[in-house]
Image (cartoon, rainbow, N blue to C red):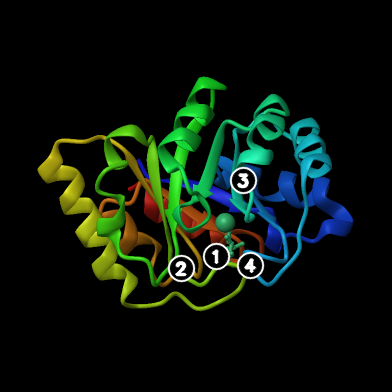
Amino acid sequence: MVKISASILAADFSDLKGEISRVLPYIDEIHLDVMDGHFVPNLTFGYPILEAVKKLTNLPVDVHLMVTNPDDHIEKFITGGASRVTVHYETCYHLHRTISRIKELGAEAFVSINPATPVNVLEEILPYVDGVLIMTVNPGFSGQKFIPTMFEKIKKLSSLRMSKGLTFKIQVDGGVGNENAVQLAQLGVDILVMGYGVFKNEQLPTLREELLK
Ligand code: DX5
Ligand code: ZN
């Protein structure tokens, strides 16, 4: 069954506790977008927010590192309670080493690619990852529009997974909501990251029901 990972970047931070409890019945994970203002043109948050989130819920926390030096931060996020760490292909000189380290530290290791990065650059790493995160917007902000050509990219990755007999998960992030979530699940996506789709969506309960069908 497809899972919903709620990106708190779209939540009202003046009441994070209230926001998380409001959407809790409809989500499976919390997604933390860590941005450094360098790899992406926005600054967000780091360890203290992970600590706060861990106090607010027992749901698994999914850390999406959009930073130029992910290796410097992996350990601290995992000891702080992250269940999954996602690093960008575009930021890792030694991706195999980074992925191995995340796993050794006990978290799920995902690799992400930007919209302009082709799926085939992942060929050699696919047997080692627990999942692939396809960015369906240019990373940096919540509330952007889904880039339609990403459907083809997801199909490509899904057939690659099948043809190689691999079992890594497929996750998508950016512009996911009422108009495309069901279609994405049908294409073989396992985890939908949603910011606006969770925190700014009055139809969330209905969408959740549709996805559970
Ligand atoms: C974008 C972030 C996303 C973002 C998703 O760089 O990685 O996780 O918060 O937000 P929506 O679902 O609103 O596009
Ligand atoms: Zn994200």
Element at badge 2?
Answer: loop
Mark 4 lies within 8 Å of ligand 1 (Cβ measured): yes
Q: Nearer the viewer, residue 181 or 109?
A: 109
Q: Is residue 14 above or below residue 164?
A: below
Upstream in sequence: badge 3 or badge 2: 3
Return the residue at label 4: 40
Question: Local crowd at mark 2 within 10 Å, few (<14), some, or many (≥20)?
Answer: some
- Is residue 31 shown to the viewer in this render? no
- In the rendered image of this protein, does residue 49 appear above or below residue 36? above
Q: Residue at x 32, y 48 (%)?
A: 213
Q: Quadrant of ligand 2?
A: bottom right
- Looking at the image, residue 72 sits to the left or right of residue 98; the answer is right
CA distance for labels 1 and 2: 8 Å
Q: Nearer the viewer, mark 3 or mark 2?
A: 3
Residue at 63% in and 36% down: 74
Q: Give the spatial CA distance, label 2 vs label 4.
A: 26 Å
The amino acid on which the numbered mark 3 sits, given as a three-letter code, is Pro
- Residue 70: mark: 3
Mark before the other along the chain sequence, 1 or 3? 3
